[in-house]
Each structure stands twice: as C-alpha cells, then as structure tokens.
Image: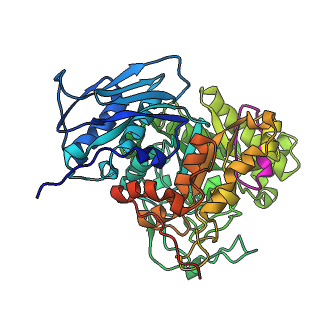
Amino acid sequence: MTRTLGPARADRFATLLPTPRSVTPAEGEFVVGYRARVVGGGDAARVLVDHLRNAGGVRIVDDPDAPAITFHDDAGLAPEGYRMRVRDGGVDVWAADPRGAHWAVQTLLQLLPDEVFGPGPMEPESLRAPACDVEDAPAMGWRGSHVDVARHFLPIADLHRHLEVMAMHKLNVLHLHLTDDQGWRVPIARYPRLTEVGAWRPGTVPGHQPPPDENDCDDVDIHDEVPHGGHYTVSELRGLVEHAGRLGIDVVPEIDMPGHMEAAIAAYPELGCTEVRHPRTCFGISEHVLALTESTLDFCRTVLDEVMAIFPRVPIHVGGDECPSREWFADERTLATMREHGLTTGAEAQAWFEDVICRHVLERGRRVIAWDEVLEGGVPEEVIVMAWREHEVIGRAARAGHDVIAAPGAFTYFDHAQYDEGEPLAIGTGLTLERVAGFSDVLDALAPAERERVLGGQFQLWSEYVHSWARAEHLLWPRGCSMAQQCWAGTADGAHTVDELVPHLRRLTARGVRWCRPREEA
Ligand code: ACM
C-alpha cells in the first residue's frame, strides 16, 4: 500500500519550543527527500545530518541539484541568535556564532515531523518543513540543567543521552555536581583515594531520611548494605565535554567545598576535623566539613587545577552551600588558622576560605560560581552567585555587585515530585508545571538594575532519590521544557500545562524520553 504524504502543516509553527522571537509563514514547503546537500555549518550541520541520516535515511550528496541547506555567517546577529529562511528551493541559515547555527538546526528539526528525533525509519519524502522566515535569539545566555551525580552515581551514557535532549531545548549548560558527602565521581591523579575510597559507600539508608531536624544523623548502621558508587574516568569526562561541545553545550563542573566533603574526608582523614568511616550513607546536611588549614587549601587548589584541565574554558563551580561551622570551633588546627587571620565567626572563616579558593580559580582565567550562602560572609565581586534559597536572594546578590544565575528552589528543584500522589519517593512533592511557570514572575519582579545582573536560569536534579536515568527523566520532563521556554523566550507562555506542551512532548516520545505523564486528579 502506498502512503499519501500530505504537505507540511503550517500549524507546526505553534509547536516550536522554545518559541522563536518571530516566525513569518511563507508559501510552499521544503522537501528534504532522499538526497540533500548541506553546505557549511560545522558541528551544527553534522547534528542535522545525523538526524536526517539516522531517522530519515537521507543520503547527503554534493550535487548542486539536490535540495540544499546552506549555512552563512552574519556577525550582525545577537550571540546565539540566528535567522532562517525555509523555501521550496532550499533552507538558508545565518548565525553570528556556532551556537546560533545549532539552535537554527534544532528549529528546523522541529519543523520536520516529530519522528526525526527518533531512531527511524521514516519515509524520506515525509521530511517536509513549511516555508517560513524565522528570527530568533535567546532572552538569557545561561540556560542550564544541573545534575547531581554524587548522591547516586549515574552512568556516563545517561549523561550523553541527556545532552541530546538538552540540545532539543536549546539548553546550553550541563552543570555536573560531581562531589558530595555520599560519593566522589571525578578522578584526581594526585589523590587517587578520592575515587578508590571516596566513590563507594557501603549502603544507603532507606526511605525518606534524615528525619527533619536531625540533619547530622550518623546512623550509618541501618543502611541497606548494598554498596553504591562509581566514578567516571578522565577520558569519559573529556568525551562528555567533547560531545557537549558538538551540540553547543558547556559542561560546568562543581566541586562542592568546604562542606559536603565527607567522601573526601573518608579517603583522606587529615582533610577533616573528625574521622569518618566511609562516604555518607544517609542524606541531609553533614557537620563533617573540611578543616581550614594550609594543607586542605593545597588539596582544594590541586583538585581544582586538575578539574580545570578536564573541563577547559568553562566557569568552575566551587559549591559553598550548607557548611556548618561547629566542628571548626573544636578543631585545634582550624582554630589556629582562624586566630592567625583574625576570624572569629563561622561566616568569617568560610569567607576567608572562599576568598582564597575563588581567587585561585579567577587567577587561572576562569569565571567562578558559588551557591548563595557565600553572600553571608562575602566573596570577591567577580564570583557568580547561584541563587537557590528564598528567591529574594537573586536581587540581594545582584545588589551586592554579583552576576547571578537564578536557580530558586521553590520553582526549579526538580527533585521534588510533580504531583502529590502516586509518585515514587522524592524529597518533596507538588512542584507542578504551573508552579515552575512562576520562575519568570520572580525575574520579572526584579528591579531593572538587578535583572541586568541575571545571566540566566537553571533547573536542578538532586539525586538522593534518583537511582536511574528513567527516574531522572520522569522528574526532568516536561518541567525542563518549561524552564527551556522561560530561559529562551523570557516567558512561560505555552508551557503552563501538559496540554499546552503536548505537541512538543510528542518529540520527546519519539526520542524515547520517559517524561512524566499527568496524574488523574484525586
Ligand atoms: C543546595 O541545594 N544545597 C544548593
């Protein structure tokens, strides 16, 4: 039986996500067909070719008579911006930089049938895009997805898979939380025990824990006795960085310090104020933090230098969150450091540490990022503050002279389930798509001078209750679609409900993404 293939449907324009700045429909359609020519475009063109070949079986030829997709430079366009002209005779893309070309490709793919995002096979004749002119550029330069690979180790293949889905949404930063109390995931040549010892814990305390107000529970003996851990190799991480780069994405590493360091202290007890037996088996905020000494600073500097070599050019995140100072006042070596530098409070001591560490990264020509707790004692003005607690912190960080990445927990902590009922165990519930849409309202409420300091936004996936990538995808999507829309288009329009997102979610289904289906109302 022969299938009749209808013309490309002009209502594809309404399905584009994130929404381009302007789309002007024109007459006709571009048919890719069995053979196509791709001219210029570098990595972006290769992404396009991969989809056309893999899903559509298209042969890429050098024949001037074949339908052509042609990439051009236009230095006059905004960073990451692009123009695209789709006509019967061919597609032309103009971009000022490689990322602009990438995002044009993603828009072109979205104009084609959803199956182009899947494994195929497709009828090449079905690869049709409605004619149009697109002009587009992002509202925000930082459009991030954070993944915690420390609480639960997530295999590298899952991160590669995530990069591809991020690119579909024009997200441009993968923030990897590589170290925490429960596990250390990045090899450091000078400190091999970080991965030999710090990457493995003997078990995990089951259920939702720790109980509220018992953050420093050391009840490691009631864990499930299932060893958990793993780490990436340097070459795997380099491969991830390369793959990300080929998709227009940066991978930003985080080494969380001086708190959240129990795994490192388990590997090298001299780093800590008290001994710990092994990486932490429960969650919550640990009191077991780095001692403040010259030798722990040396350790941190060495780790950061090795990390900077694995992740070239990008900003480096140095953590700085949730660092209780109680142990510092009981540790003779830390007290000596505090006396030497005239530090009397925990906030002053942490500020001293942050100053040394942040300047070390800055002196190597990198930008440095820290969680917003660092505002309490102060950090150099050049530090980018990642604002996660109450959303007023965004304005406070901006007024203190910092660039800010908005990651307000109430809207962007996707470790909280989307629904109150019927979900697997999560750290909390009720972070609905409608609520995620409130992220834009938070930014809109800023004074213009504060808003100017906001580089962009990102959504976080902490992994206390995330053991597999299937679970991760369930938490990430469709809420990640909403954040992508808000960071690119500057508005949550079209992303308030699953119903609004359904035409786009078909692409995720084609890609095999296990996005969270709506629950029936109870
Ligand atoms: C954080 O959620 N502790 C940054």
Q: Nearer the viewer, residue 381 or 38?
A: 38
Q: Nearer the viewer, residue 76 or 347?
A: 76
Residue at image coords 27%, 43%:
127
Residue 432 in the image: above or below residue 221: above
Q: Position of residue 155 (x, y in %)?
A: 39, 57
For the question of whether residue 292 can be seen, the reply is: no
Residue at image coords 74%, 49%:
442
For the question of whether residue 345 can be seen, the reply is: yes
Quarter location, residue 462: bottom right
Q: Which span of residues is magenta-colored? A: 379-394
Taking the image as shown, residue 258 lies to the left or right of residue 327, namely: left
Taking the image as shown, residue 462 lies to the left or right of residue 438, namely: left
Q: Position of residue 128 (x, y in %)?
A: 29, 41
Q: Residue furthest front?
A: 27
Q: State how many labels appear.
A: 0
Residue at image coords 52%, 64%:
475
Q: Position of residue 335 (x, y in %)?
A: 81, 51
Q: Nearer the viewer, residue 369 or 221?
A: 369
Quarter location, residue 103: top left
Residue 354 in the image: above or below residue 70: below
